C-alpha cells in the first residue's frame, strides 16, 4: 500500500474514534520519496503519533478525517494558500537535492561502507573453561547486516544475544553480539558477517586457546618428576665422584 493510501486509512480510523482520544502530543514532519518511476512529497500532521492530516504537495490536496479535500472549508483560504506557496519551494528544493545525491553517488541509491569486525572473549581464553565470545561490528552502512557465530566452521546453535543497533556520529552503524561458549581441545571459534558492501562473507577467527587447567596440571607434574629425577642423578654422581676421590687418597704412600 502506498503512503498516501495508508495515511487516508489511518486518518479515517483516527477520525472515527476522535471523540475518545485525549491529545497528548501533536507534531508535523515533511515526507519526500524519489524513485525513477515515482515521486511523493508531502507534510504529515500527527496526534499521539497517529496521522490525522496529510497534505500532498504534488497534488496540492489534503486528506482530512480520511477524506480527500482542497482544505478550504476545513482550514480556510489563507492557510491553504500559504501551504501551496510553501509546497512549491519545498518541492523544487527536494528535487534539486535528489538530483545532487544521484550525481554524487553515480546514480547509486545507497552508499555502501564495509564493516570492521572484532572478535574477543570476556575472560582469558582457555580450554575446558566456560566463557563469553563477543563479535563487535562497526563502521558499516546501510544498517542491514547478518552476524553468525561459527564453531569449527559450522554455525553455532546456542542463544545469541545482541545490543541495540547504534548510529555513530558519521552516520555509520555498529552492533555487538555475544554467545556463551565452553572451549574444548581443538575448537576454533569465528564470527561471520554478511553485508551488502561485501562480495563474500567476512570471517574473523579468534586465536586457538592456551592450554587449560588440566593440561597445566599435567605439565606441572611432569616438570616436578623430571626435576626430582635430575636431582637424584646429580646426587648419585656427586657421591660416586667423592667415593672415588677418597679411595685414591687412601692408596697414596704416607711420607715419614
Image (cartoon, rainbow, N blue to C red):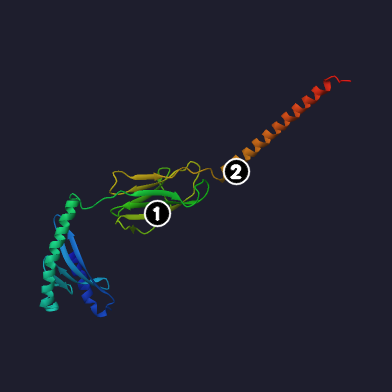
- Determine which residue is flagged by label 2: 217
Eyeballing the image, is 187 above or below 176?
Answer: above
Local packing at callout 2 (Cα closer than 10 Å; few below 14, some 14-19, many 20+) is few
On screen, residue 245 versus residue 133, left or right, reads: right
Q: CA distance from mark 2 to mark 1?
A: 34 Å
Q: State which quadrant residue 152 falls in.
A: top left
Please say whether residue 2 is visible from this viewpoint.
no
The residue lying toward the viewer, choosing from 253 and 168, is: 253
The local secondary structure at tag 2 comes to helix
Q: Residue at x 50, y 42 (%)?
A: 185
On screen, residue 134 versus residue 83, left or right, reads: right
Q: Residue at x 18, y 54 (%)?
A: 101
Q: Residue at x 19, y 64 (%)?
A: 31
The local secondary structure at tag 1 comes to strand
The residue lying toward the viewer, choosing from 87 and 243, is: 243
Contact, CB < 8 Å: mark 2 with mark 1?
no
Q: Earlier in the sequence, mark 2 or mark 1?
A: 1
Amino acid at each position: 500500500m502506498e503512503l498516501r493510501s495508508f495515511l487516508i486509512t489511518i486518518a479515517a480510523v483516527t477520525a472515527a474514534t476522535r471523540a475518545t482520544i485525549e491529545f497528548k502530543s501533536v507534531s508535523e514532519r515533511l515526507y519526500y520519496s524519489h524513485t525513477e518511476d515515482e515521486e511523493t512529497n508531502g507534510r504529515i500532521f500527527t496526534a499521539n503519533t497517529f496521522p490525522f492530516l496529510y497534505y500532498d504537495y504534488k497534488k496540492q490536496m489534503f486528506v482530512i478525517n480520511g477524506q480527500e479535500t482542497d482544505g478550504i472549508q476545513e482550514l480556510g483560504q489563507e492557510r491553504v494558500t500559504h501551504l501551496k506557496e510553501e509546497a512549491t519551494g519545498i518541492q523544487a528544493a527536494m528535487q534539486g537535492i535528489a538530483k545532487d545525491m544521484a550525481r554524487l553517488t553515480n546514480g547509486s541509491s545507497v552508499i555502501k561502507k564495509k564493516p570492521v569486525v572484532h572478535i574477543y572473549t570476556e575472560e582469558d581464553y582457555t580450554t575446558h573453561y566456560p566463557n563469553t565470545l563477543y563479535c563487535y561490528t562497526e563502521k558499516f552502512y546501510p544498517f542491514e547486516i547478518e552476524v553468525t557465530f561459527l564453531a569449527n566452521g559450522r554455525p553455532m546453535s546456542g542463544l545469541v544475544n545482541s545490543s541495540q543497533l547504534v548510529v555513530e556520529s558519521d552516520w555509520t552503524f555498529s552492533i555487538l553480539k555475544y554467545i556463551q561458549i565452553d572451549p574444548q581441545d581443538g575448537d576454533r571459534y569465528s564470527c561471520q558477517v554478511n553485508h551488502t558492501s561485501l562480495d563474500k562473507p567476512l570471517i574473523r577467527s579468534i586465536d586457538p586457546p592456551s592450554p587449560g587447567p588440566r593440561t597445566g596440571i599435567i605439565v606441572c607434574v611432569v616438570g616436578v618428576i623430571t626435576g626430582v629425577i635430575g636431582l637424584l642423578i646429580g646426587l648419585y654422581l656427586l657421591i660416586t665422584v667423592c667415593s672415588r676421590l677418597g679411595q685414591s687418597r687412601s692408596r697414596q704412600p704416607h711420607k715419614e
